[in-house]
Structure formats: structure tokens, C-alpha cells
Image (cartoon, rainbow, N blue to C red):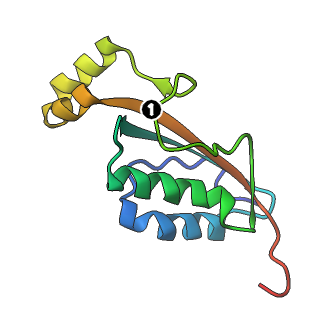
Amino acid sequence: MSLFRFLLLRHVDTVRLDSFHNDLLRILKVGGIFIHAIDMYIEDQPTSYSYQRFAAYKGWVTNDHHVQPIGHVYVGPLAFSCDMATNPDNILHGWNLLVPGLARLRERAQSVCLLVAGRKQPRSRNS
């Protein structure tokens, strides 16, 4: 019997993403699915932090042969596009009231939600 039917985690530090992903796969049964929704701010000229974080999440479903991606894997450059979810101005205004330290970033960046989903595959005997 599985211990977890649903697991929600938020705000994983970039330096811990690989460890987080490895632990996630360790506790997930073969055939199990993970879905991770990530809020990111993407600017016209993305920062190295944004590139690093985006690459780490994308790597979860493209670099690990024990994970089968679920859905479309974005192959374009890191840039805001209309097919990405974003938050309307009234929501961002409310966020600025709650966390004013991010107000300047929100003036120049779009808040987008990335969805990363995969199914754990069985390990081969050679891995």
C-alpha cells in the first residue's frame, strides 16, 4: 500500500532541486506520477538564475531515463509567450501588498507557471 496519494511541496531552493527530484523518485512507486507546478518570473532578458532553474526542471523529464514525460516538453528558448499562464494585474497588486520586496521584479517580469509532470519508469538491471 502506498503511503502517499498526494504530496505538495513549495519553494524548493535551486541548489536542492536535484536532491529533491532524486528523493521524489526514490519514494515514488514505479508507474507513479509526479506533477510539479512552479511559479517563475521571466524577464525580457532572463537571468542566469532563471536559466538554471528552468534547465533543472526541464531536466527532470528530459535527462532522467527513468522518467517518462507526461505532456508536451517545451523545446524553445526561455522567454515569456502567450501560451504560458500568468497572473492578472489585480493579483500582482495584491502580491505586492503582501510581499513588497518583489514589487520591482514584478514591474519588469512576467509571473508564469511551469508544469512539470512525469511517470516513474522501472530501472533496468544495468542502472
> Mark 1 highlights which residue?
112
Instruction: Give the image location of residue 15, x and y in percent.
Output: 37, 67
Q: How crowded is mark 1: few (under 14 residues within 10 Å), some or many (20 or more)?
A: some
Q: Indicate left or right for 31 with 13 as reference.
A: right
Instruction: Give the image location of residue 66, x and y in percent.
Output: 75, 68
Residue 41, can we see it?
yes
Q: In which quarter of the image is the N terminus?
A: bottom right
SS at circle 1: strand
Residue 99, can we see it?
no
Q: How many labels does the image show?
A: 1
Q: Quadrant of the C terminus?
A: bottom right
Residue shown at 58% from the left, 25% from the top? 83
Instruction: Give the image location of residue 86, x and y in percent.
Output: 44, 24
Q: Indicate left or right for 106 with 23 as reference.
A: left
Q: In the displayed structure, would residue 105 be above or below residue 22?
A: above
Q: In the displayed structure, would residue 20 be above or below residue 82?
A: below
Q: In the displayed structure, would residue 17 be above or below residue 77?
A: below
The quarter holding residue 123 reads bottom right
Residue shown at 81% from the left, 58% from the top? 31
Q: What amino acid is labelled 1 in the image?
A: Val
In front: 79, or 65? Answer: 79
